[in-house]
Amino acid sequence: MTAPTAAELRRELCGLRSGHDRRPPPRRLLDAQDVLLPGGMAVGLAWGALSTPPGAAAPLVGPVALLLVALALKLLLAVGPVVVSSASASWLLTSPVDRRSLLRGRFGAALAASAVGCGLLLAALGPFTGSAAVTASGVPLGVLVGAGAVVLQHAPASVATAQRALRLCVAAAVLLLGLVLVTGRDPLPPDGVLWPLVAVTGIASAATTAAASRRLGRFTRASLTGGTRLVDAARASATWLDPAVLTDLLATRRALTTGRVRSAALRGPRAAAVLRAELVRLRRNGTGVAVWAALALVPHAAAGVLPDAALGAVHLVAAFLATERLAPGLRALARNAALRRAIGGSDRRLRLLHLVIPTAGALIWCAATVPALPVPALAAISAAVAVAVTCRLATRPDLDYSSGVVLDTPFGVVPANLVRQVLRGPGLLLVLVLVQVVLVTG
């Protein structure tokens, strides 16, 4: 008896999956619109950007593109990018089937997603520079990023080195963005230099794709399932509308990368001990402080691109994102009753103690971004709103899916109580963003 080929195995699996899908065609069309509508909106935005004339945003394109591409490559390396589920690893990868042929479809999907994403990004950013080379470099650069991630995935030892190098690249992009905001100079070279670089990128992407394709047959199950838990957690968070599933896993992975630390006793009064513990937590998690500082560039970058009516809203959202990065202790305290009992004191007092550092961070951040606002008084509003939304979001209880009013609307059945719970925090931020816009325009 001969072993089935990868193509025969895929056809068999597709037949079994289609047999379980008993949705009528109209229902399939309604489900497809969840993907088609956001995709169409993204294509429309990119198409509209093609007619945008070069302007004040031109110097920002290079640092922003470098930052986004580095973050995309970090995400690809964290996920896979060629990833299989636990069931596929147990039943398919252990079978006598050519592994290279079995993984070719996933490899092609990863390359296509990387090429389309990078192509749309540079198609949207290219017109701001007035350079056709920037727009044309999107697809080959995306293929190079995706294929390079697959090559690195084949050697797990090189992934950690690549992640450290990408962190330096992200830091360099942020520093370059700050330098551009200070000097106003465009770091991109002219088209005469960019077109040869585009050609080199195309050749490098073809060579890297060939090298990645040759390595598919030598992938181990450990390298293919390294990002399975992350993908499953993201899918569960999206299904249950609860990001805590994903954030808890990310916190665990971050703690594992921290390694061994030196413990120290927290002496003195309770308030001083809690504040020292929060400072140690932020020092060990340097990423949160780095993101808090990097987000201060967002209002300054928006000041030269967006109208004054939108600057207050951008400042408020950025202030919330920056403040939220300084509140890991508040989130851990709100979700752990045993920790609250171990520290002692009332819940209200503990919550106020854990808000000291986020509040100080919000005030410092808003003070540093006052020059980017059309009305300086908006900085005080942003600081207060950022702390309030951070507190509401961090202290949100676990979602309750069992009770509440269900509304029958023209768009389908809407669980009103679940929506209310999900919007605790983001809903307040949205309302206050609208108020901020009204105050600026009025």
Image (cartoon, helix red, strand yellow):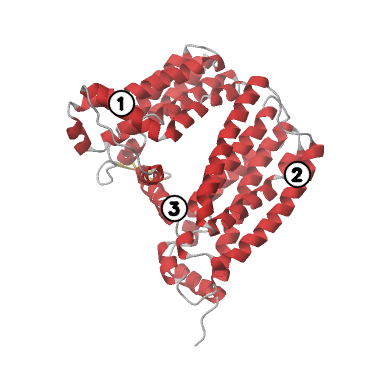
Kindly identify which residue carries mark 1.
276
Residue assigned mark 3: 231
Badge 2 or badge 3: first in the primary sequence? 2
Judging by the rendered image, the residue that carries numbered circle 2 is 197
Residue 362 in which image quadrant: top left
Please identify the quarter of the rendering in which residue 346 is found. Answer: top left
Alpha carbons under labels 3 and 1: distance apart: 35 Å
Disc 3: CA contacts within 10 A as few (<14), some (14-19) or many (>=20) = some
**Contact (Cβ within 8 Å) of mark 2 with mark 1:** no
Query: Residue 231 placed where, x, y %?
Result: 44, 53
- 239 relative to 56 in the view: left or right: left
Residue 3 x/y as whole percent: 51, 81
**Of the residues shown, which amino acid type is indicated by label 2?**
Leu
Q: Secondary structure at mark 2?
A: helix
Could you tell me if residue 4 is visible in this image? yes
Q: Position of residue 202 (x, y in %)?
A: 73, 51
In terms of secondary structure, where does tag 3 sit? helix
Mark positioned earlier in the residue sequence (2 or 1) = 2
